[in-house]
Amino acid sequence: QKEVEQNSGPLSVPEGAIASLNCTYSDRGSQSFFWYRQYSGKSPELIMFIYSNGDKEDGRFTAQLNKASQYVSLLIRDSQPSDSATYLCAVIRNSGNTPLVFGKGTRLSVIA
Amino acid sequence: KAGVTQTPRYLIKTRGQQVTLSCSPISGHRSVSWYQQTPGQGLQFLFEYFSETQRNKGNFPGRFSGRQFSNSRSEMNVSTLELGDSALYLCASSRGGGGYNEQFFGPGTRLTVL
């Protein structure tokens, strides 16, 4: 089992809809969870992080964490064509001094 | 606040050569991590430096090495280049003082090995 798994997509949603991106992780001791957005040809950009169970909202983005089920998700409300990118889930195991482990990303396409 | 910078942005080398990439972290950040990104493998961790010491290391051969200077700038070196080393090399910086640290990426260096 891979440490961090994401559906590679592409996930296609119409403009204005809610995009739901999911990520599961294998290490139950994982502590910190991050979502990065990567446009084609660009470097990853941090958009959300979450450390505690529950929901965390930032503008149109909501991160959801369920440590018991070992999954973290990202919801994008009112999706825009500019949200079309690859979304990478990353996890830090145990303490903050261990490296980020990335999933391979989910490609999101928002159709105008 | 200036972001993470990497030089050079693009590099073309031939097999057997060596290459050095440079990364300047965000001011105040003491941790620099290096990643290799390829279409097939995704983002893979190479190593992390904190206060001039390698703190973590990924599963890469010894041809990949790095170092960090007292001003937190970091370099990574790849010796005896192979075709499979063609990739986007990313560095990311964080405060690195423990706890839950957000990492911020630089624009990357695109390395092509011919």
Image (cartoon, rainbow, N blue to C red):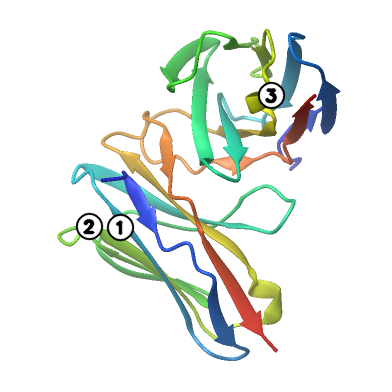
Q: Position of residue B58 (x, y in %)?
A: 44, 23
The correct choice, above or below, for B96 with respect to A17 in the image is above
State the CA–CA distance, disc 2 to disc 1: 6 Å
Q: Secondary structure at mark 3?
A: helix
Task: Inspect the image, locate mark 1, and give the three-letter code of the amino acid beneath it.
Answer: Thr
- The front one of A11 and B20 is A11
Q: Position of residue B9 (x, y in %)?
A: 82, 33
Dot label at residue A24: 1
Q: Residue A102's image quarter?
A: top left
> Would you say residue A78 is visible in this rendering?
no
Q: Position of residue A19 (x, y in %)?
A: 49, 80
Closer to the camera in the image, B64 or B41: B41
How much space separates mark 1 and mark 3, taking CA atoms?
33 Å
Mark 3 or 2: in front is: 3
Specify few, some or many for label 3: CA neighbours under 10 Å numbering under 14, 14-19, or 20 or more: few
Circle 1 packing at 10 Å, graded few (<14), some (14-19), many (20+), is many
Residue, disc 3: B83
Q: Quadrant of the N terminus of chain B?
A: top right
**In the image, residue B59 lies at what x, y percent?**
43, 21
Q: Residue at x 43, y 50 (%)?
A: A103
Badge 1 sits on which subunit? A
Query: Looking at the rendering, in which quadrant would you find the C terminus of chain B?
Result: top right
User: At 38% from the left edge and 41% from the top edge, which residue is drawn?
Assistant: B100
Q: Are marks 3 and 2 in contact (CB under 8 Å)?
A: no
Q: Is residue B86 above or below residue A33?
A: above
Amino acid type of the residue tagged 3 in the rendering:
Leu
Q: Which residue is mark 2?
A: A70
Indicate the chain on which mark 2 is placed.
A
Q: Residue at x 72, y 26 (%)?
A: B24
Contact between marks 2 and 1 (CB within 8 A): the answer is: yes
Task: For marks 1 and 3, give the one nearer the viewer.
Answer: 3
